[in-house]
Amino acid sequence: MSLITLRQALDAARAGGYGVGAFNVTDMTQVEAVLEAARETRSPVIVQTLSGSSAHGSDELFWDLMLRTTERYADVPTVLHLDHGPDFETCRRAIAAGFTSVMIDGSLDPVTHRPATFEANIEITRSVVDIAHPAGVSVEGELGTIGGSETGEEHKEIILADPDEAEEFVRRTDVDALAVAIGTSHGAYKFSSPPDGSVLHMDLITEIARRVPDTHLVMHGSSSLPADLRAVINANGGTLPESWGVPESEKARSTQLGIRKINQGMDSHMAFTAAVRQQLGQDGITVDPAPYTRFGRVAMQQMVAERMHVFGQAGHAADFTVNA
Ligand code: 13P
């Protein structure tokens, strides 16, 4: 068994001065793509998924398949992580399913999808830590709000994380990792021009890392939105708007400033979808989904492997003792 907790993965990343990619998956071919990329690059990895996001019929079915698949990758130190748990019950279900890490996103009110109060955020985050830690499961919380769609609802507002609040939040919740809003947003539409310091507040990372030295910082909305992949998607029937994401160089730099977990969903999914659309465009006859899905899986594996080198986790599977 190669499962490790988020705390274990990120403690080692801090000691080694690297970042670990947390790749969003929504079906089993993507789980395979991420784990194969980790094996190929000898990386520890965080495989993460949002409740209700998968192509499978239920969370529990998908989560169980994910868990079992990690047994075939005994050489890959793997964190199974729930991304943006919207409430206590979803986090409880992920822990019961065998996840080694959960995120409770208390930054948004689950009913109104408006920013929650600081006290409400602390209360729900603490309640999840209280069940997770005794079960040996790590917890990620969130401070500030990250723009884009975190919950399926459109939410454009970005409220930057506050260093004073970060210190108090960590002290009162005991989270292992903290998602800090520094100006990034989720999804396929991020910035209308290449982002500079007025958009991406990299200085906040340094300050918050200094204030909460034992808690690992997480960058959400880290996809770069590669223009070449958008061009392939749009040449094959897609209608993605022009947009800029977080440059690769800034992601690499963030790991030197104190970011340890780097969340990537869109880039992986763009790689998958570009390959599938291209294949479908070239082959009007085949109706079996397997051949074109295979192209998607391989393209996603290549993308994830490239990112593992950028984040610095490549070669660091050796930091962990797992059953090879
Ligand atoms: P992207 O939407 O930039 O891929 O970020 C994913 C993410 O932060 C998931 O929590």
Image: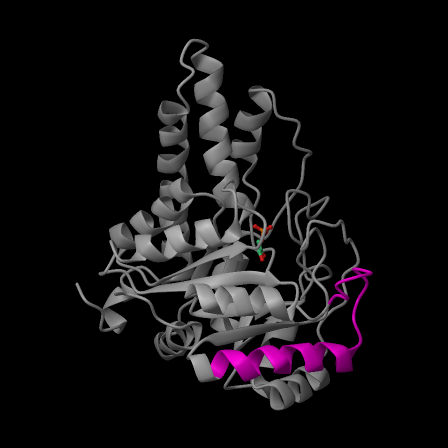
The colour mode here is one colour
State whether residue 74 appears in this view.
yes
Image quadrant of residue 145?
bottom right
Across and down, in percent, residue 116 comes to 78, 71
Q: Quadrant of the C terminus?
A: bottom left
Judging depth in this view, the residue of 40 and 5 nearest the camera is: 5
Across and down, in percent, residue 118 comes to 76, 79
**On the picture, is 16 further left or further right than 143?**
left
Query: Is the residue 201 above or below the residue 277 in the image?
Result: below
Judging depth in this view, the residue of 286 and 320 nearest the camera is: 286
Image quadrant of residue 266?
top right
Judging depth in this view, the residue of 125 and 171 nearest the camera is: 125
Q: Quadrant of the N terminus?
A: bottom left
State whether residue 261 appears in this view.
no
- Residue shown at the point (70%, 73%) measured from the top left: 161
Query: Is the residue 230 above or below the residue 83 in the image?
Result: above
Verify whether residue 50 appears in magenta: no
Q: Residue lying at the far top in this picture: please name it.
A: 285
How many marks on residues? 0
- Residue shown at the point (41%, 33%) measured from the top left: 296
State the extent of the magenta-drawn residues as a range. Answer: 108-133
Query: Is the residue 117 above or below the residue 249 in the image?
Result: below
Dominant secondary structure of the magenta stretch? helix
- Residue shown at the point (56%, 50%) measured from the top left: 223
Image quadrant of residue 42?
bottom left
**On the picture, is 224 further left or further right than 77?**
right
**On the picture, is 113 further left or further right than 2?**
right
Across and down, in percent, residue 259 comes to 52, 70
Verify whether residue 116 appears in magenta: yes
Q: Residue lying at the far left in this picture: please name it.
A: 324
Across and down, in percent, residue 252 comes to 47, 61
